[in-house]
Amino acid sequence: MKALFIGGTGTISSAITKQLSEQGCELYLLNRGTRNENLQPNVKVLQADINDEDQVSRLIQDLEFDVVADFIAFHPAQLERDYRLFQGKTKQFMFISSASAYQKPLSDYRITESTPLANPYWEYSRNKIACEEYLMKQYRDHRFPITIVRPSHTYDDRSIPLGVHGSKGSWQVAKRMLENKPVIIHGDGTSLWTMTHNSDFAQGFIGLMGNMHAIGESVHITSDESVTWNQIYEAIADALGVKLQAVHVSSEFLAACSKEDYTGGLIGDKANSVVFDNSKLKRLVPGFVATTRFDQGIKQTVANILAHPEYQKEDPEFDRWCDRVIGALEGALASLAE
């Protein structure tokens, strides 16, 4: 198989790149070369900014692919560019959308690919929906061979997956745990969520590559495991070897008092209970199963981050905000007790 990835080194795509290279795929990555230092030697790099359409067109002028996958498109205009570049040059074009595009609030917590797409809370999700609509039109009108993939919360060994964190990532929450400071969990922590390790996601994605039954289809790829946010934070604390000091705060309150986009990221996504039905994926990719249980995968992630200081990005502004929110709640409780 001959494939081109636009991106290829991110949380989701890095595991796919690694597994395909080990399988002997003729794999090209088109990116700016800022995170290619750990690539396998048989991966070919086309160094360019995908937004420079003329440069990319020259680079791929004499190339054709079995699969082209765009991991970094977020707006319809970027897919319009991809269509101009790759129409007639690939047998399958794969777009990485988002499971956050499914309707919020959900009419049924069990999500299938037929669950309506509608998210009034998060512009990111609405843009992904618009991207999907554009691609489906190109498939219907011009037979552009698209496959839409919807990941949910996928994590790797470089970042701890969380519900509430600052703009610089999740390390500050882990640092608070290590310092025996309280950490914020949105809601009461009992809503159901799904965490998927990127190595499991990669297996499902690779099974869709070159799969004629996936053309014109939308498929989500997630673990079958459902965990509560309380369980998620407990597993992280356990991996760090500390006792969790949890403070539960309503998602609406967090959205109202933060500069972060918690309206989108929480109310439009993580505050909702979700259980994914992966029957369609398993029908298209017989034998697919996500094998990394969260409490096992997070131990691997935490160990890797503790061993690599470059992944420990401190966020003092977020840390101070957490203290202010927790202090405000404690003050409110104290005033009510008077």
Image: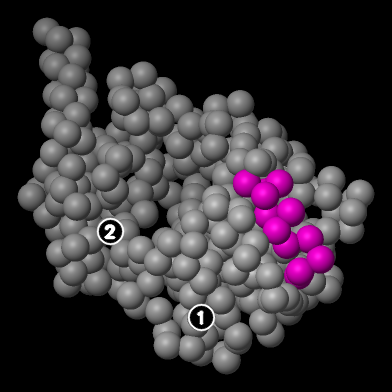
Residue type, numbered disc 2: Ile
Q: Secondary structure at mark 1?
A: strand
- What residue is rendered at 9% in x and 48% in y? 180
Mark pair 2, 1: CA separation: 36 Å
The answer to which image quadrant residue 297 occupies is bottom left
Q: Is residue 152 visible?
A: no
Pick out the residue farthest to the right.
141
Q: Secondary structure at mark 2?
A: helix
- What residue is rendered at 35% in x and 77% in y? 38
- What residue is rendered at 84% in x and 45% in y? 137
The residue singled out by tag 2 in the image is 236
Judged left or right of residue 3, residue 155 is left
Residue 216 image point, x, y percent: 83, 59
Whether pointer 2 and pointer 1 mark residues with C-beta atoms closer than 8 Å, the reply is no
Picture disc at residue 44: 1
Q: Relative to the observer, which residue lies in front, 141 or 184?
A: 141
Residue 294 in the image: above or below residue 107: below
The answer to which image quadrant residue 306 occupies is bottom left
Label 2: few (<14), some (14–19) or many (≥20) C-alpha neighbours in 10 Å: many
